[in-house]
Amino acid sequence: MSSDVTPTSKPVKTTGLHIGEAEPGCRKVDPILIADGVTRTFGGLKAVDVDHVEIPRGAITALIGPNGAGKTTFFNLLTGFDKPDTGKWEFEGRSLAHVPAYRVARMGLIRTFQLTKALGLLSVLDNMKLGAKGQSGENLFRAVFPFIWRKQEEEIEAKAVELLTRFKLDAKQTDYAASLSGGQRKLLEMARALMSDPTLVMLDEPMAGVNPALTQSLLDHILDLKSQGMTVLFVEHDMHMVRHIADWVVVMAEGRIVAEGDPHTVMENPAVIDAYLGAHHDTDLGATETENVEAIKELIDDEQ
Amino acid sequence: MIDWIQIFSNAAQELISPTTAAYALAALGLAIHFGYTGLLNFGQAGFMALGAYGYAISVLSFNLPVWAAVLVGIGASVVFALILGIPTLRLRADYLAIVTIAAAEILRLVFTTNTFEAITGSAQGLNGYKGSFAALNPIPKGTYGFGPFQYNEYDWWLRIVGWTVVVLLALLTWLIMRSPWGRVIKGIREDEDAVRALGKNVYSYKMQSLILGGVYGTLAGMIFILPRAVVPANYQTSLTFFVYAILLLGGAATILGPIIGSMIFWVLLSFFSGFISRAVEAGWLPFMTQVQAGQLRFILVGIAIMLIVIFRPQGIFGNKKELAFVK
Ligand SMILES: Nc1ncnc2c1ncn2[C@@H]1O[C@H](COP(=O)(O)OP(=O)(O)OP(=O)(O)O)[C@@H](O)[C@H]1O
Ligand SMILES: [Mg+2]
């Protein structure tokens, strides 16, 4: 899972995000999202067990960790798609506990899914338009009178086309989303999430399956989001991408936050190596772990 | 010999019959539920029963005028939709299916039971509620029409009102389905979590859809009883399945589909029943009695629908491209 594209320009990293030591659960200068004691168990398995974590505003934060670490489950809990057993969390100072998913989204916290959710039998353009907020025509009574919503619809369409062009999907506007390839669906989902001008975008593996040439332009786009003042939190297994664009990295393993730090120092943390290789990395490695080993090797190589 | 003219002219009459209009409207309601929103409502017969009984009881027991009786029926179906929807619309789609099928049966049994005979007429049902509707008829007494379509003033009045309601609601459906509201509704059909993640209150939209399609069913129930009596046995689960057959025949997520589907369904049914019963009379089918022949028409309609679904699975008006994608 490595992209061979070398970055054209070095992105500007945001620094000075944290207060005190860069340790798990460390405080941030200006946190946008704060989670406290959030736990979720499935049967006997504690999938998420986060004591405290703060996501810095206006920066790009990567959430990394081996398969099954609980990243997606944590995303689901934060965005109201799953209910935690315990814990509280707040977004821009407002508590999100018991807030239904659609309200979380309206507050400006938009997420994408690891298993892409393109709306297959809607056109690509309709998928995009659905993402826009505050549409008066979405009310059943006003829907009957097109003159009420036509103007807003045109604005939304212009915006959708602009975003589609940026994501190289403009030629597919009128096609059903079901006819897109897997990578194109990822792009569509991300573009759709941006239709609502969110303050925080949470992307679950946005680059999985996207070809390297496009990855580069997407990375630029994510950096662009940052320069527009958006906060980005993303899950990614591609360490090159993490290193390239993340300002801050949070490492999860077995449901817990095991390390935090800027991308260059966090990789040297022994807890991270343990997380990826397992506590038994001196013993024989199973086939499933080789991929993780590759990833961490790449990282260590990159650092040198 | 077989009187083909008679068979064809009877079949042609079904094109504009009030029953065809009623089924078209009920199917249009299901198109909103199933075709556009993806809600599995198997209780459309219940909504139709509420229209039929709501109207008839309002007129007979409470002496209400036509408009008030219509509103009572609509009100009853809104309440019914809320009762069905509140507990189930947050759950997986199958729960709605189970609850609607059971609730429609419960309604039918409540209307059938002797306990409320004074109001519902129990198994005999109700009649004698048509006076106030007929009184609104502006058409002078007499017989009008051409070809096979010869009717008296009441029958024309019935057809005009019935089909006007169908056309108006078809236009309304067309309008809302091409609006942003319709986009959200279709999005929910595709993946409700994705729509939720975009900040739409999915539960509320599903409820709106359930109520709206249910009200269509209720109005269909009212049109259905104007040419006949209210009989509880008409509102069995098989009624819902006939409406589904019509919907799939025409195309589930289409506006014209349910209407043309209903016409085809009733014309075919009438044609087969006319043909078989005369064929038995003429001795063409010596192994069959008239009673058996009455059942055979449903078998033939079933086969005809199967053929259409096999060779045109998207329905008559459906978009072939949609089927290219297997979910
Ligand atoms: N609905 C569920 N029911 C039971 N167990 C679950 C459920 N969802 C997740 N889990 C378990 O919780 C743990 C965390 O899963 P999660 O999907 O959050 O991992 P992840 O960090 O996103 O992994 P990946 O990088 O592979 O996507 C896993 O062990 C998984 O088996
Ligand atoms: Mg995951």
Image: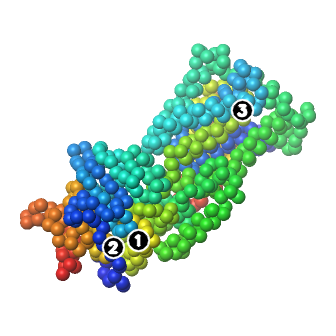
Name the secondary structure under disc 3: helix
Q: Which mark is residue A226?
A: 1
**Amino acid carrying mark 2 in the image:** Thr
Q: Nearer the viewer, mark 2 or mark 3?
A: 2
* Contact check, label 2 and label 1, Cβ < 8 Å: yes
* Left or right of B312 on screen, residue A226: left
Name the subunit of mark 3.
B
Residue A252 shows up from this direction: no
**How many angstroms separate mark 1 from mark 3 (CA)?**
57 Å
Of A237 and A155, nearer the camera is A155
Name the secondary structure under disc 2: loop
**How many angstroms separate mark 2 from mark 1 (CA)?**
10 Å
Q: Is residue B153 above or below residue B326?
A: above
Read off the residue under disc 3. Answer: B70
Residue B242 position in % (x across, y down): 60, 39
**How many angstroms separate mark 2 from mark 3 (CA)?**
66 Å
Residue A211 position in % (x across, y down): 38, 75
Q: Which mark is residue A14?
A: 2
The quadrant in which residue B25 appears is: top right
Name the subunit of mark 1.
A
